[in-house]
Image: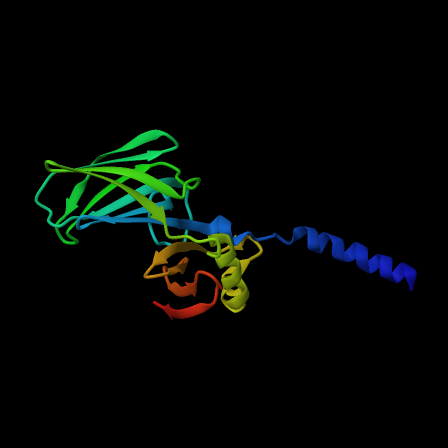
Amino acid sequence: MKLLLIGLILLLLPLSACQKQIDYFDYVSELRRDIFLAEVDGFSLRIYNVVKETPYAPDGIPKERSARVETYLVPPDGSKTCHLTFTINQNNYGGEMSFDNVKSEYYYACTLDISSVSEIPCRIEYGDKTLEITARSVRTTDTLTPEHILHSLQETETELFASLTDKYGFMGEIYIRLLYEDAPYYYVGIIDRQSKTYAFLLHAKTGKVLAKRTS
């Protein structure tokens, strides 16, 4: 009996060694980890802390990623030149913002990691007007991290993750975006190799799935 048990263990060892441990966070090709907000004198500023793949394409294949800052400014009107300067760790960044006529907002982006800050001092030069404001994170101490959110979704949608996983890895890519509408939420999108998207809205404090759809 003892020899039989040893034989079974030796037989199973190579099988377990061949099984690949999947870290699904490795397949996140777009991540919005934080949102910073500020409002003053009719101006509304949003700053996103994001990581995105390059080139950006929802094709189910994750690519190399880079950290970015994306800023959006909604002014009282869009008729003036707008320049944004913001400070991260005592260094200044920024430039002239471009205006989107469709969305009626200004936009500026650059490659930069801002994951270590909870507020961002900003200077806005709008025509002959200058504003000094501080954009603050919407995250609170009980807001789950993107890593926790993905793990929670994985436990809830075990069949979906299993259907897209084989011995070589995960056959898709994942988008995780922090949202804010009076309170933080998370959007998680799973895109397979046929560009089919499984979309989920999750509670940012509990990880509970509030809504889902497939497209």
The residue at the point 75 percent across, 57 percent down is: 12
| Name of the residue lying farthest toward the top | 91
Residue 135 located left or right of residue 97 = right
Residue 16: name its quadrant. bottom right
**Relative to 152, residue 46 above or below:** above
Residue 192: name its quadrant. bottom left
Residue 32 located left or right of residue 145 = left
The residue at the point 37 percent across, 63 percent down is: 196
**Image spot of residue 106 (x, y percent):** 18, 45
**Image spot of residue 44 (x, y percent):** 22, 50
Q: Is residue 11 visible?
A: yes
Residue 85 located left or right of residue 177 = left
The way the protein has been coloured in the rendering is rainbow
**Residue 104 versus residue 182: which sits nearer the camera?**
182
Quadrant of the frame with the N terminus: bottom right
**Residue 94 versus residue 166: which sits nearer the camera?**
94
Quadrant of the frame with the C terminus: bottom left
**Residue 153 versus residue 185: which sits nearer the camera?**
185
Q: Is residue 48 visible?
A: no
**Residue 138 versus residue 72: which sits nearer the camera?**
138
Q: How many numbered discs, if any?
A: 0
**Image spot of residue 115 (x, y percent):** 42, 42
**Image spot of residue 52 (x, y percent):** 37, 45
**Relative to 85, residue 45 above or below:** below
